[in-house]
């Protein structure tokens, strides 16, 4: 196993924050990243996924691959994520059904956009496999599947025309925000919660900024200046988040999505908020590792096994919703819910690594 | 000849006025006292649109499972689809364009985030926000629920978009549920404070359940609406909307008599 490191640490922390954000009403939800930024842990997670893609693309094995094998390698990863999404969705439906049966409350079958599956199973199951029907809070992995399916384009453009990558990504992002284009959902009419055309910018930014040369290299060489530039942006985010301020979408000039604080379209203020967090806190790991080493080890372990931990985290958040319905919310219940969930996430990470260790 | 045209115009005017002034009658199965359906509140933007003879009204129906239509036998039997037919029948010459953005099981805070984007992209004249049931089930604090509602409603009002709050559904097992009661009270409180139309599904459904013996608004599981339930929901909302268009009209100052010809 690779030793604790900054990327795994932040990714592990993002996973715990995602858990808290996915249990509506949990008392700790006022104390997550949302409290100090217009961005949240989902942005960090996708950004770090792009960063990890850079680490993979820079590996000796990947650099030795021709284009065809790069495609095969990354599409097989996309398929693994797709399979994970299908498995956790099916388990989530079973949890929902079991919760509804045990608590004798059919209304619980409607939670998290699950109603269509129980009401209209034929269409909904087609939608689940096509990713056009996503359960509420189970909508990040479908985005990740699309991003990973498009990852060969990122890696190959970077390999053969690196200067084209950011302009290409920005062009897709701008076209998406100008047109409002998004993938449709079906059978429940609507749009994807995370628009891949917009969110790919977060992913590509992670990939580009992780690079040793180009934009990544330049930013790294100007690290202190960038950090000071980011401080006022971060401060503005803290104030906006604290006072719940966001611009009135209807008073903004067209195209409005460029100035809104919109999550679905990863609007520029949210991307700026993310970059400010990265600029200010990036590199802070060395202090955490020095002064709070057990925390660095703990969160790195979660982040190192992020897909497995994310899957369990998603299911735990759903179970926690049922627990809160059953027992009622409150500081005691919510603290127990959070501690149990973190323990389960850690156990998942430990088990994943143990399985790797015992492989012959 | 001119006199005949004038008489015809008056007659036509009376017919149009009659069609618009009288909300369509409720089906016998959906009868409930007006006070149990909604308290009067103005819909100023919609009233202005209709007064200016606007031919189309854009409506955003947002919320959770009752908006999406869990339990309906087809997409044509959901409440937004039925509401469009009723409104177009009652408001002659007006085309009602309804976008259904129901996501089952969603709490108010998540819907509020979607609502802002949907409003910015779809630019509706009226928002029908069905809300509360899932917050009660998820044990969301009534104070947090109130804050979410208030900030969203204030923004809609400031943006000249009318909003109708459609409340929690009635289910006998929730009559004594503390969380359910707290969220219902919070919803009522916000509607009064913000002076927005609040369709209290709970009271109307309770009245029907207790007085209309033999009528089932809820399917076999005792919780989901069935086709008749959605029919009644659509009738109650459209009745409240149409009746309250004239709250505003009655409140308007009477036009001054024409100045005498010199």
Image (cartoon, helix red, strand yellow):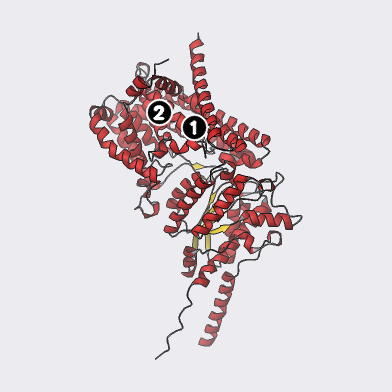
Give the camera-side residue of A172 and A219: A219
Dot 1 alpha-carbon crowd within 10 angstroms: few under 14, some 14 to 19, many 20 or more: many
Which label sits in the foreground, 2 or 1? 1
Give the camera-side residue of A243 and A21: A243
Chain holding disc 1: A
Quarter of the image that includes the N terminus of chain A: top left
- Nearest to N terminus: mark 2 or mark 1: 1
Residue A147 image offset from top left, x and y in percent: 42, 32
Give the camera-side residue of A31 and B49: A31
Q: Would you say A80 lies left or right of A178 here?
A: right
The dot on residue A301 is none
For the point 66% across and 41% down, the residue is: A106
Q: Secondary structure at mark 2?
A: helix
The dot on residue A19 is 1
Residue B247 image offset from top left, x and y in percent: 54, 68
For the point 62% across and 66% down, the residue is: B24
Q: Would you say A215 lies left or right of A320 here?
A: left
Residue B134 image offset from top left, x and y in percent: 58, 44
- The CA span between labels 2 and 1 is 18 Å
Residue B78 image offset from top left, x and y in percent: 61, 52
Q: Is residue A340 above or below residue B178?
A: above
Q: Which residue is mark 2?
A: A49
Give the camera-side residue of B209 and B189: B189
């Amino acid at each position: 196993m690779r030793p604790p490191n900054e990327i795994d640490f932040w990714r592990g922390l993002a996973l715990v924050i995602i858990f808290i954000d996915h249990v509506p009403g949990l008392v700790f939800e006022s104390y997550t990243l949302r409290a100090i930024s217009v961005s949240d842990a989902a942005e960090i997670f996708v950004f770090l996924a792009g960063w990890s893609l850079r680490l993979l693309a820079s590996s000796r094995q990947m650099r030795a691959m021709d284009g065809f094998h790069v495609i095969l390698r990354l599409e097989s990863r996309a398929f693994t994520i797709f399979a994970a999404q299908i498995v956790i969705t099916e388990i989530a439906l079973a949890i929902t059904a079991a919760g509804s049966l045990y608590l004798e409350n059919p209304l619980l079958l409607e939670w998290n956009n699950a109603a269509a599956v129980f009401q209209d199973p034929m269409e909904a199951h087609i939608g689940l496999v096509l990713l056009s029907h996503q359960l509420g809070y189970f909508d990040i992995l479908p985005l990740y599947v699309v991003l990973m399916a498009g990852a060969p384009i990122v890696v190959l453009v970077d390999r053969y025309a690196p200067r084209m990558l950011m302009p290409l990504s920005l062009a897709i992002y701008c076209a998406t925000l100008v047109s409002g284009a998004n993938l449709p959902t079906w059978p429940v009419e609507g749009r994807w919660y995370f628009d891949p055309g917009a969110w790919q910018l977060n992913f590509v930014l992670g990939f580009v900024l992780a690079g040793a040369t180009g934009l990544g290299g330049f930013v790294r060489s100007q690290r202190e200046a960038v950090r000071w530039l980011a401080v006022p942006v971060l401060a503005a985010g803290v104030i906006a988040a604290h006072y719940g301020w966001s611009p009135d979408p209807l008073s903004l000039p067209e195209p409005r999505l460029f100035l809104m604080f919109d999550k679905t379209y990863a609007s520029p203020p949210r991307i700026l908020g993310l970059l400010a967090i990265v600029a200010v806190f990036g590199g802070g790991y060395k202090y955490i590792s020095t002064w709070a080493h057990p925390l660095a080890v703990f969160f790195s372990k979660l982040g190192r096994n992020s897909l497995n931990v994310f899957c369990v985290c998603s299911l735990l958040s759903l179970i926690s919703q049922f627990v809160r319905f059953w027992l009622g919310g409150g500081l005691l219940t919510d603290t127990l819910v959070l501690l149990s969930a973190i323990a389960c996430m850690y156990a998942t990470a430990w088990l994943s690594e143990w399985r790797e260790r015992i492989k012959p | 000849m001119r006199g005949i045209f004038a008489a015809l115009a008056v007659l036509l005017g009376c017919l149009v006025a009659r069609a618009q002034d009288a909300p369509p009658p409720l089906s016998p199965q959906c009868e409930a006292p007006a006070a149990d359906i909604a308290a009067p509140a103005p819909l100023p933007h919609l009233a202005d649109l209709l007064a200016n003879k606007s031919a189309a009204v854009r409506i955003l129906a947002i919320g959770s499972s009752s908006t999406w239509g869990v339990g309906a036998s087809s997409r044509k039997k959901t409440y937004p689809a039925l509401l469009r037919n009723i409104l177009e029948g009652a408001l002659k010459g007006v085309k009602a364009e309804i976008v259904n953005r129901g996501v089952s099981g969603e709490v108010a805070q998540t819907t509020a985030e979607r609502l802002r984007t949907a409003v910015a992209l779809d630019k509706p004249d009226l928002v029908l926000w069905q809300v509360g049931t899932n917050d009660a089930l998820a044990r969301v604090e009534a104070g947090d629920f109130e804050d979410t509602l208030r900030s969203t409603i204030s923004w809609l009002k400031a943006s000249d978009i009318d909003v109708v709050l459609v409340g929690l559904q009635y289910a006998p097992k929730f009559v004594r549920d503390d969380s359910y009661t707290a969220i219902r009270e919070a919803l009522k409180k916000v509607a009064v404070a913000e002076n927005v139309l609040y369709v209290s599904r709970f009271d109307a459904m309770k009245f029907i359940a207790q007085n209309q013996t033999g009528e089932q608004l809820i399917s076999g599981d005792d919780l989901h609406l069935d086709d008749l339930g959605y029919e009644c929901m659509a009738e109650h909302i459209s009745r409240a909307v149409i009746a309250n268009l004239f709250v505003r009209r009655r409140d308007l100052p009477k036009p001054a008599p024409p100045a005498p010809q010199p």
